[in-house]
Amino acid sequence: MGDISKDIKSTFKSNRLKAFINLKYTANWLSSKENEFFKEYGISPQQYNILRILRGANDQMKVQVVKERMIERAPNATRLMDKLCEKDLISRKRCDEDRRVVYVEITEAGLNLLTEIDNTPNKLNLIKNLTEEEAKVLSDLLDKIR
């Protein structure tokens, strides 16, 4: 099991400071592991998030709604969607009534990619060392921080 004090060779003036640094360190570690995992599929974690949002919608959605639902609010969400369109993982359509409104929808290829990712053994199981109860406590504590 890791210990933030040993990992970064540092001491902390308080447990709150240690927890804060540990949270940032762990978030960076998780992000790195996520990037490494999705690289194999030719997408980023943010693009994966977009695909999951669209799969859950079961229909086309306004681009703005997709942006609002993203876990990591990316200022480059339009560019991320452009890349997904280029890979034929999503399709885009302008609204006939209001040309400023753009709809996006997951394609069959996008659904197939998500199924492949979903069926990957141990896919991103980065918190496998936690019990279900510990995962609930962690989630509750993270909610409390926000």
Image: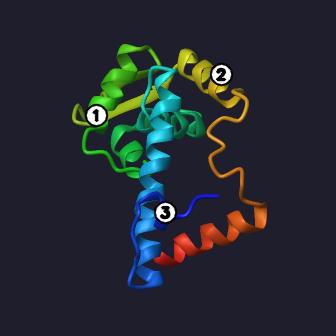
> Residue 45, how many percent across, how many down?
45, 37
Q: Residue at x 25, y 35 (%)?
A: 98
Q: Residue 81 vs residue 55: left or right? A: left
Q: Earlier in the sequence, mark 2 or mark 3?
A: 3
Q: Is any part of residue 125 visible from this angle?
A: yes
Q: Which residue is mark 1?
A: 78
Q: Which residue is mark 2?
A: 116
Q: Residue at x 50, y 39 (%)?
A: 33
Q: Residue at x 31, y 45 (%)?
A: 74
Q: Earlier in the sequence, mark 1 or mark 3?
A: 3
* SS at mark 2 in the image: helix
Q: Residue furthest bottom?
A: 14
> Residue 54, how many percent across, how many down?
51, 35
Marks 2 and 1, Cα distance to the nearest angstrom? 25 Å
User: Relative to the observer, which residue lies in front, 144 or 78?
Assistant: 144
Q: Which residue is mark 3?
A: 6
Q: Earlier in the sequence, mark 2 or mark 1?
A: 1
- Figure quadrant of residue 114: top right
Q: Residue furthest left?
A: 100
Marks 1 and 3, Cα distance to the nearest angstrom? 41 Å
Q: Is any part of residue 146 visible from this angle?
A: no
Marks 2 and 3, Cα distance to the nearest angstrom? 38 Å
Circles 2, 1 touching at the beta carbon (< 8 Å): no
Image depth: mark 2 or mark 1 in front? 2
Q: Residues within 10 Å of mark 3 (few under 14, many from 20)?
A: few
Quadrant where the image shows the N terminus: bottom right
* SS at mark 3 in the image: helix
Type of the residue with mark 2: Glu
Image vertical order of residue 77 relative to residue 85, above or below: below
Q: Residue 133 vs residue 98: left or right? A: right
> Residue 146, how many percent across, how many down?
44, 73
